[in-house]
Image: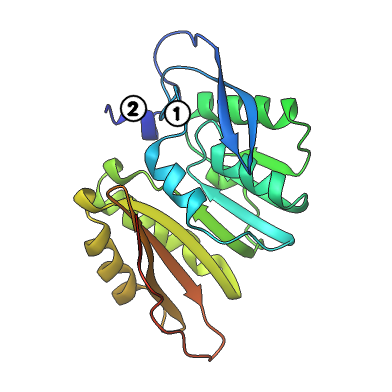
Amino acid sequence: MSPEHYFSTSPSGDPVLRTITARLAGRDVEVTTAGGIFSPDRVDTGTQVLLAHTPSPPPGGAFLDLGCGWGPIALSLALESPRATVWAVDVNERALDLARRNAQALGLDNVNVCRPEDVPDDVVFRTIWSNPPIRVGKNELHAMLAHWLPRLDVSSDAWLVVARNLGSDSLHRWLQGELPADFAVLRAATSKGFRVLRVRHRSGTALTEPIDIVD
């Protein structure tokens, strides 16, 4: 898959819009996608695993979808927690346009779709969900996670899905070594060749390793 899917601000060529049906937050919805973004034809397997193996989000607060693409994670969060404010962040302008279209079409006025630099610095997140762009390269990925994960509120969780063959276990170890001491990184689930990692901002309470769910 071309790196353009992840970090080109303006994909080449004119977008050819298409409508697909996606299963989000327990319902079938119609969304608009186009080429030049990540997984334009369906909800990709990694995102499916994340959505299937992550507990329901908090009822309110500020949420972050890091690398939103056309919006499957952000839309799911907004549908499940209508009182929350969901920040859907990406660098790909086409993806941002599609995520805005989809939020509007679903009547979700609690989704803020924007570039990373447009998120106010004082926003603290009750949860962060992400299928991070592994193929941008290790340095870029690490810098991105090191910037956003410390903005997780105390006693709150981030959930990341990463393919095992693309370094989920090495990323787990890196996060454990690089995040502040009051963060814990745990393996929450394994499914279809992917790991779901839980990053917990602790409040002094010990967090034990959960049972790894395999299917």
The amino acid marked with disc number 1 is Thr
Disc assigned to residue 89:
none
Q: In the rendered picture of this protein, how many numbered marks are placed on residues?
A: 2
> Residue 9: x, y in percent?
45, 28
> Residue 61: x, y in percent?
72, 61
Disc assigned to residue 4:
2
Left or right, 12 with reference to 113: left
Q: Residue at x 55, y 48 (%)?
A: 65
> Disc 1 and disc 2: Cα gap in Å?
8 Å
Toward which corner of the image does residue 184 lie, by quadrant?
bottom left
> Residue 110: x, y in percent?
76, 44
Q: Is residue 109 above or below residue 80?
A: above
Using the rendered image of the protein, determine whether residue 144 is visible from the camera's viewpoint. no
Q: Residues within 10 Å of mark 2 (few under 14, many from 20)?
A: some
- Residue to which mark 1 is pinned: 9
Using the rendered image of the protein, determine whether residue 215 is visible from the camera's viewpoint. yes
Toward which corner of the image does residue 101 lie, by quadrant?
top right
| Quadrant, the C terminus | bottom left
The amino acid marked with disc number 2 is Glu
Q: Pick the residue in front: 32 or 145.
A: 32
